[in-house]
Image (tube, grey):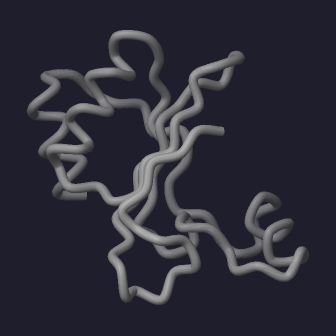
Amino acid sequence: MDALQQMRHELGSPMTISSGYRSPKHSIEAAKIAKGGPGGAHTTGKAVDIACDRAFAYQVLSSALRAGFTGIGIQQKGVSRFIHLDYIRPGDGFHVARPSIWSY
């Protein structure tokens, strides 16, 4: 939350959170678990998706890097555009290496 507040202050603009904490029973997380994997970073309470596109997406990405987020996923096509941010550290026991940037 502190890093998100830092970003909000730096951007001088509110950010729309499209997804925050998700229960392991949430359909997206349950599907991952049903395939034999662990739930995603949202189930740790250390991940958030911010609805944004175009120039604002660039500003969010730049600010997130400065704020120290270690997992950044970028979805900038279609109608549901967002940037995923998480704060998983190496050694937290999470299944994906950090730091990392990916696209959807």
Name the residue nearer the viewer: 41 or 65.
65
Name which residue lies at 47% across and 71% down. 97
Name the residue nearer the viewer: 38 or 18.
38
Farthest right residue?
Answer: 34
Percent from the top left, x then y, of residue 34? 89, 77
In the rendered view, does 4 fall on the left or right side of 52?
Answer: left
- Place residue 25 in its image quadrant: bottom right
In the rendered view, does 72 fall on the left or right side of 68?
Answer: right
* Vertical order, 40 against 58 (above or below): below
Percent from the top left, x then y, of residue 29? 74, 66
- Place residue 90 in its image quadrant: bottom left
Number of numbered discs visible in the structure rendering: 0
Image quadrant holding the N terminus, namely bottom left
Name which residue lies at 43% across and 11% down. 54
* Vertical order, 84 against 27 (above or below): above
Percent from the top left, x then y, of residue 60? 30, 30
Farthest top residue?
Answer: 55
- Place residue 17 in its image quadrant: top left
* Vertical order, 50 against 21 (above or below): above
Image quadrant holding the C terminus, namely top right
In the rendered view, does 5 fall on the left or right side of 17?
Answer: left
Name which residue lies at 24% across and 32% down. 62
Name which residue lies at 53% across and 45% down. 102
Name the residue nearer the viewer: 100 or 55.
100
* Vertical order, 42 against 36 (above or below): above
Name the residue nearer the viewer: 48 or 90.
90
Percent from the top left, x then y, of residue 83? 47, 36
